[in-house]
Image (tube, helix red, strand yellow):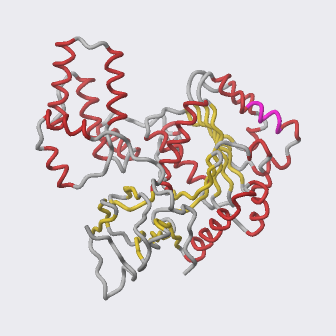
Amino acid sequence: MSEFEFDGDVDSKNIIPAETYEYDNKEFDQSEGVQLSSESGGGAYRDKVTTYNYNGKRIPVPIRWHPNSVIRRIIEHNKRSKYTGVTMIGMSGTGKTTLTNKIIHQAHVMGENYIVKRLNGHDMLNIDKHIKEMKVGFPHILVFDDASYTMEDAPKAEVAKLANALTTVRHQLKSRVIVIINFHYSRATKKFFRNQHFTFLTSVSVEELGNFNEMYKDKMNVVRQFARQYNNMTLRGYFMVPISSFEKKVIKYRMNEPFRIALVAEIADLHFIVYDKDECGKCLDIPKRGKHMDLKTKEAIRDHLMSLHKDRKLRIRTTLEFFLTVKLGKNFLSGSHNDIWRHLNEMDRGVGVPDDVWEDVFKDVSKSIKRTSKSSKDNKKNREKSVMELANMIKQEMGEPDDKPTNSDYDSHYTPPPQ
């Protein structure tokens, strides 16, 4: 299998790129905003690359840089610790709100039913009142926008009151809580808010480099690398994601096509990530503002579903099949879904499997099935398989991909020189 190598501009008249290309045993779609290139020389080591689906195209993203991996760790941390603090630091217009909405939306996509409460600086100083109005027993995501001026001017007693309220809010709500606080600059972040579980930097300036020195003394080289990448993104319109420092292989992303670059500190791990604009009406609280809208006609219901999950049309159809089969008592399933559904019902009636055992089976199957992107040819073959053949194939696909590269020699902080 040959690697994709490209040193020129995709718009060049002398080079007509293929519609798809392969790298690391995965197939990607050619995109003007994303270019994977390789220079001559280097060794055989490479970083693990996964597929990111954007507007119907498969584009490469290093696993370590993948935003969904970081968001998944935020959710998993919240499940274990019940309280998770997230701090966003960046100048106005650099993507703090976009990244916040990305986290909220991805949590929603993962099936986590958090209640999202958005508060401003004034609300922060009256946090006790707002906590009393929240629903007890339900997980919450509390978002504090534009907290810089509130934190900078607030008396120490008020800041201490807020810090105490946030650390005890999970006990008052008797459920899990994620707190996301957005700051325009790092000086406004008091020690309590700097010492959160996840801290994202969406921008950096010359002045901020001095401020960050206090926060990341031992890892300022990473912050400076981020500064160079951020400078390239905002002034030149692109930034580079290194895949292998040995092969000198990089992915070049145009700004907002689809990604921006950020820096994240996960407890003690500081590294780069990329993120895109990914949100829906439910995450932005649009259904609440439009609670009187008519959802009784088929057109209204269809348009509402498609607006909330516009990038997941196939999943909408599949989920509707199962939902209506259960709700209406009629079989809306087709193909292998119908075969497996019938087989499960026969097992349940014939053996009498207890409900708690079914729940355990679901958990084990969810953990064991390896989710990998497949070509349309493989999908066509799978549709032709019998139920038993599919079951045997699932048994062979054990284990999930590791979030971190397995190569210990790979330098995840390598940044190519500006071009």
Residue 243 left/right relative to 228: left
Asked if the magenta segment contains residue 414, the reply would be no
What secondary structure predominates along the stretch shown in magenta?
Answer: helix
Image quarter in which the N terminus is found: bottom left
Residue 332 left/right relative to 119: left
- What residue lies at 53% left-to-right and 38% top-to-bottom? 75
- Report x, y in % for residue 263: 61, 57
As displayed, is residue 47 above or below residue 254?
above
As displayed, is residue 389 above or below residue 343?
below
Residue 140 shows up from this direction: yes
- What residue lies at 26% left-to-right and 38% top-to-bottom? 318
- What residue lies at 75% left-to-right and 57% top-to-bottom? 217
Which region shows up in magenta? 159-165
Asked if the magenta segment contains residue 163, the reply would be yes
Residue 217 left/right relative to 249: right
Closer to us: 398 or 233: 398
Q: Quadrant of residue 115?
A: top right
Residue 277 shows up from this direction: no
Closer to us: 287 or 367: 367
